[in-house]
Image (spheres, rainbow, N blue to C red):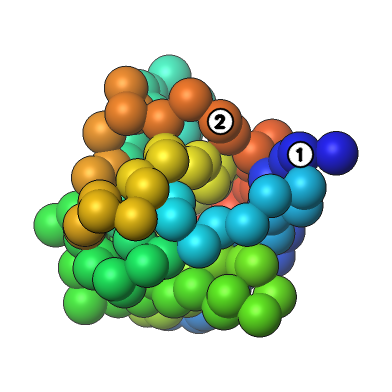
């Protein structure tokens, strides 16, 4: 079954850390760009980071730059998003999504409209 499964969300205090996982099953991430998005209640879905699994190019939105880190483990066919120095405004449902890049594609984008296959999301709540 082809799917993306996010995990690792939870409740954390401000300043804390979490590691989100996005596990792909039924296909290989090798030639895909994988992006992380988040959506808070009443707000639009926001692209916050992405990685190209082939060339490891990355992107971070200004809102998370220096605090979050994206990585890919090809052996586990899984992408991770390390969330550090969490703030209450990071509270949202976090989603991963993939975009086929092929053998010549490079880098990645975090634009919602570029991605057509999504996971179900994992909730991150930052609160004291």
Circle on res. 2: 1
Say which element carries label 1.
loop
Q: Nearer the viewer, residue 109 or 62?
A: 109
Of labels 1 and 2, the one closer to you: 1
In the picture, residue 117 is in which quadrant?
Answer: top right
Asked if the residue at tag 2 contacts the one at tag 1, i.e. Cβ–Cβ closer than 8 Å, the answer is yes
| Left-right relation of 59 to 53 | left
- Reply above or below: 77 against 7: below
Visible in this render: residue 32? Answer: yes
Q: Position of residue 11 (x, y in %)?
A: 67, 62
Q: Nearer the viewer, residue 37 or 54?
A: 54
Residue drawn where x is 26% and y is 33% of the image: 111
Q: Position of residue 106 (x, y in %)?
A: 21, 57
Residue drawn where x is 25% and y is 66% of the image: 58
In the picture, residue 1 is in which quadrant?
Answer: top right
Circle on res. 32: none
- Reply above or below: 116 against 54: above
Furthest residue in direction right, as rendered: 1
- Reply above or below: 12 against 63: below
Q: Residues within 10 Å of mark 2 (few under 14, many from 20)?
A: some
| Residue assigned mark 2 | 117
Residue drawn where x is 29% and y is 71% of the image: 55
Total number of numbered labels?
2
Visible in this render: residue 37? Answer: no
| Left-right relation of 106 to 9 | left
Question: What is the spatial separation of the Cα atoms under label 1 and label 2, in whole angstroms?
Answer: 10 Å
Residue drawn where x is 32% and y is 36% of the image: 46
Furthest residue in direction front, as rendered: 103
Q: Position of residue 86 (x, y in %)?
A: 41, 69
Q: Residues within 10 Å of mark 1 (few under 14, many from 20)?
A: few
Quarter of the picture containing the C terminus is bottom right
């Amino acid at each position: 079954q082809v799917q993306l499964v996010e995990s690792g969300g939870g409740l954390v205090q401000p300043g804390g850390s979490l590691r989100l996982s996005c596990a792909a099953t039924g296909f290989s991430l090798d030639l895909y760009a994988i992006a992380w998005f988040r959506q808070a209640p009443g707000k639009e879905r926001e692209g916050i980071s992405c990685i190209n699994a082939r060339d490891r190019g990355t992107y971070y939105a200004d809102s998370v730059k220096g605090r979050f880190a994206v990585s890919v483990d090809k052996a586990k066919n899984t992408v991770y998003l390390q969330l550090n120095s969490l703030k209450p405004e990071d509270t949202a449902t976090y989603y991963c999504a993939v975009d086929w890049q092929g053998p010549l594609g490079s880098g990645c984008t975090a634009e919602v409209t570029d991605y057509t296959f999504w996971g179900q999301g994992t909730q991150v709540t930052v609160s004291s």
